[in-house]
Every structure is written in structure tokens, then in C-alpha cells.
Amino acid sequence: MDLNFNPAEQDFRDEVRSFLAERLPARLAHKVAQGRHLAKADMEQWHAILHARGWLAGHWPVAFGGTGWTAVQNFIFENECALANAPRIVPFGVNMLGPVLIRYGTDAQRRYWLPRILDGSDWWCQGYSEPGAGSDLAAVRTTAVRGVDGDGEHYIVNGQKTWTTLGQYANMIFCLVRTDREAKKQQGISFLLVDMTSPGVEVRPIITLDGGYEVNEVFFTDVRVPAANLVGEENRGWDCAKYLLTYERTNIAGVGLSVAALERLKRVAAQRTRNGRPLAEDSLFAARLARVEIDLENMKTTNLRVIAAVAGGGAPGPESSMLKIRGTQIRQEILALTRRAMGIHARPFVAAALDGDEEMACVGPDFAHAAAAQYFNNRKLSIFGGSNEIQKNIVAKAILGL
């Protein structure tokens, strides 16, 4: 089932499809379709292509270098990119920090940082989670003590962040730090921009279950940060944090990714057989496939409603928590069905196949080598960005009034 677009929206979809056909490198599309790990250069290449076209920052106002697209145009763009197997835009600068700077940053911060996000001068990562502060994010213990010396006002940062995605590539990190240790948990927190090349910053890798290196621990030891890198008011960083998380959770829902994954699953189910018949005709499998497709169609409509709130400078509300819950459940179910459809061919796991070794990728049918790795790796979807249990509490309180 497809959504009903008006003629202008259909023309925009055709424009996006033509752009992807012409400008999306086949090498990148092949890696994404095969479930392979993308290198830093791969992500930077796609970032640069979108920036050159002016299509990088779909949710930003035109005045700051954004597209000025409507909610429907953003939806169309994200879905067409997913269906074409385009790499996802690295979200930390464009989709997370950018909106925070537009809302809470000073004019000087916006003039300096926003163009650098767009042209790729800075690669940002997120410094939120800590060993004792995951879903309970207000429990952050990394400290920032303000001082003054001959070089001006600054903060001295000490502490640790964990699960820092793609931090090994980043030169900048936006952090939640505690600037008042006597205040209550959600008070006394500030939002600080830290140069990863500063003395005292150490990045240590965490190897994930699929053999990939995408997350890290980051340690800060007496790291000096200019006071000008404070975003918003000191001790009011929780406002920035909550605002950013609504964008992160909407992004985690990954409706476009689910649409593309479902199309792949349907092709697999039509090709694979059970008892001499296509797997798509197996009653139990077909019922699960139909259920997840219905759920995804409902998600499309909900997604449009939520991202419509962004139009005109708004931000996703607590509805983003609903998207995060259902979106991650749907993505996990599609991956579970894909792994099941591959049968015994999903069992072998050759890490080299995910890193681009074509000779090691010939175990079973197309995509089989990635089925198990993606299934296990994406169990994290319902945990990061605030666990689904936390999101249910937000929905109960903010939407249902319980």
C-alpha cells in the first residue's frame, strides 16, 4: 500500500528518484544492500554529495542552510533513499546538534558551527551515556568546573562517556556534563561542545557482537574547554538534552529503513522454499509477514504526524517516544523474519564478509551473510536512545496523563 501524494509531492518523489539514480554511487548502494560495514570515507562521500545538492539538512530552516521541505517531502526523501540503499546520513551533527544550536545556540555559535556541520569540516559524536547513566540519563557524573585564567573563561572536564557511536572518527563531541554537583539530578547539568583532539581525551573501542567497531568509551582527564562552547544556559542543559532526544528517537524509529528491509524480506520469502513451496505461502510465516506490514503502514501515518510538528521550527513532542517504541519493534521483527527466512544459511558468520571481502561473502543466498549479524546487532534498537520501557513511562505521563 502506498500513501496518496498530491501532484507536487509526486513530482518531488520523481525528482528524488532521478537524483538517486544519477548520483548515488553504485559501490555504496551495493555495500548497503549487502549489509556490509561502511568506512568513514563512504559516509563522508554521501554526506558531500547531499551537501552539494543542498539536500543534507531536511529539517533545518532555509535561513540556516536547510531545505525548507515540508514534513511530507522529508518523509518521501528518507523513504526513497532507504529504498535505493543509500547510506544513512550520520545523524549526530545534522539531525541532533544542528536543531539544538538553531534553538538554543548563540548567533556566534550558529554562524560558526552550522556551516561546518554542513560542509563536513566537523564530525560530531554524542557524549550522553555513562556507565551509571544510560536510560537514567540525569544521573550523569562527568563534571565540568568553570574557571578563569590568562586565556579566559573555561571549563575543566573530567569523567567518562560510553557507547559513543562512531567516536573513533569524530573530532568534536557534544556532552552533557554536571556543573553543579549539589543540585537535583535534572538540574545542574550543562550542554558543552568539546574538541576531541584536546589533551586529556582518550577514545577506547568497544567491539560489537557482529565484529564491528562502531561504539567507544571516551575518557576526559582535565580537559580544557572554552566557556564559549557552552550551549544554552549553565545548569540548564537538560532542556537541550530533552530537545535533542526527541529528534534522536524519531530518527531511531527508522521508518524508511523498515520499508526497505520489508521489501528485501518479501523478495527473500518469494525465493526461499519450504516443503516445496515459496516461504511466502507458508501460513505461519505469511501471517507474521502480514502483521508487520500492517504495523509498518500504520507507522508511516504516525511518522508523518510527528515530523509535521517540526515544520515551521517546532520539535517532535512525546509522540516521538511512540515512534521509537513501535519503530524499533517493527525493525526487530523484520530482521527476525529475515534471519528465519534464510534458514541454515543464516548460521555461518564470516566477519570478513561484512568488511568487504567478496570472496568470503558466498555463503548461501544474497544477504545471508548479514542476516544473523544484523539481527543480533539490532537488538540494541529497543535499548539505546532511552530504553522502550522508559519511553512507555514518557507516553503514560506526557500523553495519557497517568
Image (cartoon, rainbow, N blue to C red):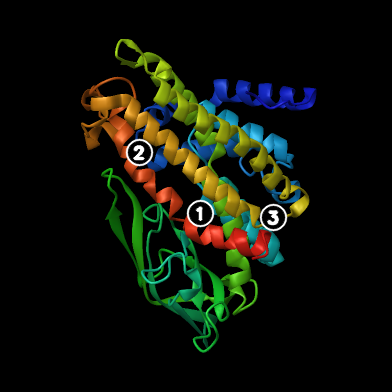
**Amino acid residing under circle 2:** Gln
Local SS, label 2: helix
Residue 45 appears in the picture as rendered: yes
Q: Residue at x 53, y 49 (%)?
A: 325
* Residue 385, horizontal then vertical, whole percent: 49, 56
Mark 2: few, some, or many residues within 10 Å (few <14, many ≥20)? some
Callout 3 touching callout 1 (CB < 8 Å): no
In the displayed structure, 60 sits above or below 397; it is: above
Q: Residue at x 35, y 38 (%)?
A: 374
Q: Check disc 3 and report the residue beneath it.
A: 315
Local SS, label 3: loop
Left or right: 363 as drawn, with respect to 122: left
Q: Pick the quarter of the image with the N terminus.
A: top right
**Amino acid residing under circle 3:** Ala
- Residue closest to the far top: 276
Left or right: 206 as drawn, with respect to 155: left
CA–CA distance in space, label 3 to label 2 = 31 Å
Q: Check disc 2 and report the residue beneath it.
A: 374
Callout 1 touching callout 2 (CB < 8 Å): no
Whichever of labels 3 and 1 marks the residue nearer the N terminus, that label is: 1
* Residue 241, horizontal then vertical, whole percent: 57, 66
**Amino acid residing under circle 1:** Asp
CA–CA distance in space, label 3 to label 1 = 24 Å
Front residue of 401 and 47: 401
Front residue of 343 and 357: 343
Q: Check disc 1 and report the residue beneath it.
A: 122
